Image (spheres, rainbow, N blue to C red):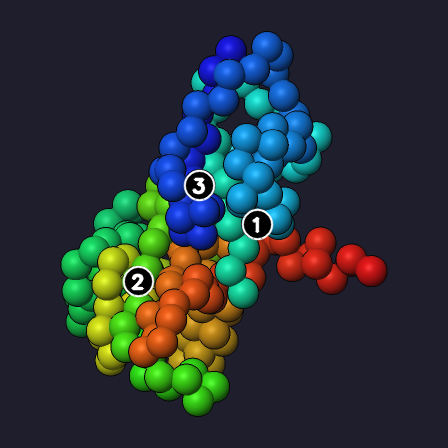
Amino acid sequence: MQIKVKFFAGIAEATGQREYVLHIEHSPSVQELVQHLTEEFPQAADLMKRCMVSLNHDYAKPDQTITENDEIALIPPVSGGEVDKLAELSDDLFEVTDQPLSSDALIAKVSNPYAGAIVSFVGTVREFTHGQRTTFLEYEAYPEMAVKKMKEIAIEIKEKWPKSEVAMSHRTGKLDIEEISVIIAIATPHRDAGFEAGRYAIERLKQIVPVWKKEIWEDGEEWVGHQEGPWKIHENNEG
């Protein structure tokens, strides 16, 4: 059987490929798949072992079985909602784009007669991080999974703060200093809920939405990324 695997960010750079087709005699588990890939790409083995595996746009467990028709991706570490609820959310509210972002446009998407407050979070590219000067950033994403995870965050917010409306946009590609990388807009009946939901949204986005960034410095570069991801659990459990 043939299994196609998508690579992103540091994995794509280490392997020199965006996709790889694995030929195998049986349906492997997620753990077996990673083992095969580390043997095929020894130069990326250490990073692959710290990756999560996406199975049909959800994080997979090590013992899950993979079939030929599954969509598989390796989600590299850098630094689920119910199907019916996901379907209820408009695709227009969530996007990953290489075009400049507008807070006014996103606010307009969540504005409604029941909202007493609209809170927006705008993430921008800063020049200095821990004293090191950044010249620009490059963002990369797994768009299909990123949008799905944004919707899951919106569902969580609606459950915690009823009558909320949520929209998210994330930029990809090259971003210069002071350019906007991410915008989150949340409309709620009262301002306290808006502030709480806004903070929750950006923290959850960092945890589960597959977006990576490469910092380009005056004297080097590195995939630094803001995503924490489920692998943090494994890291914390290591001796």
Residue 4 visible = yes
At which x and y percent is residue 146?
39, 49
Say what amino acid the circle numbered 1 marks. Leu
Residue on which disc 1 sits: 47
- Residue that sits furthest to the bottom in the current view: 131
| SS at circle 3 | helix
- Which residue appears at 59% of the width and 43% of the height? 45
Q: Nearer the viewer, mark 1 or mark 2?
A: 1
**Front in this rendered view, residue 234 or 102:** 234
Q: Residue at x 70, y 58 (%)?
A: 235
Asked whether disc 1 touches disc 3, contact meaning CB atoms under 8 Å apart, the reply is no
Q: Is residue 50 left or right of residue 54?
A: right
Question: Vertical placement of 107 versus 25: above or below?
Answer: below
- 199, 57: nearer the viewer: 57
Q: CA distance from mark 1 to mark 3?
A: 11 Å
User: In the figure, is residue 127 to the left or right of 205?
Assistant: left
N-terminal label among 2 and 3: 3
Where does label 3 land, which residue? Answer: 15
Choose between 55 and 19: the one closer to the eye: 19
Q: Is residue 163 left or right of residue 93?
A: right
Q: Secondary structure at mark 2?
A: strand
Nearest the eye: 77 or 220: 220
Q: Disc 1 or 3, which lies upstream in sequence?
A: 3
Looking at the image, which residue is at 40% across and 56% down? 211
Compare marks 1 and 2 and give the one earlier in the sequence. Answer: 1
Q: Residue at horizontal 42%, vertical 35%?
A: 6
Residue 123 in the image: state x and y as whole percent: 34, 74
Q: Amino acid at mark 2?
A: Glu
Q: Which mark is residue 138?
A: 2
Q: Quadrant of the C terminus?
A: bottom right
Q: Is residue 72 above or below residue 46?
A: above
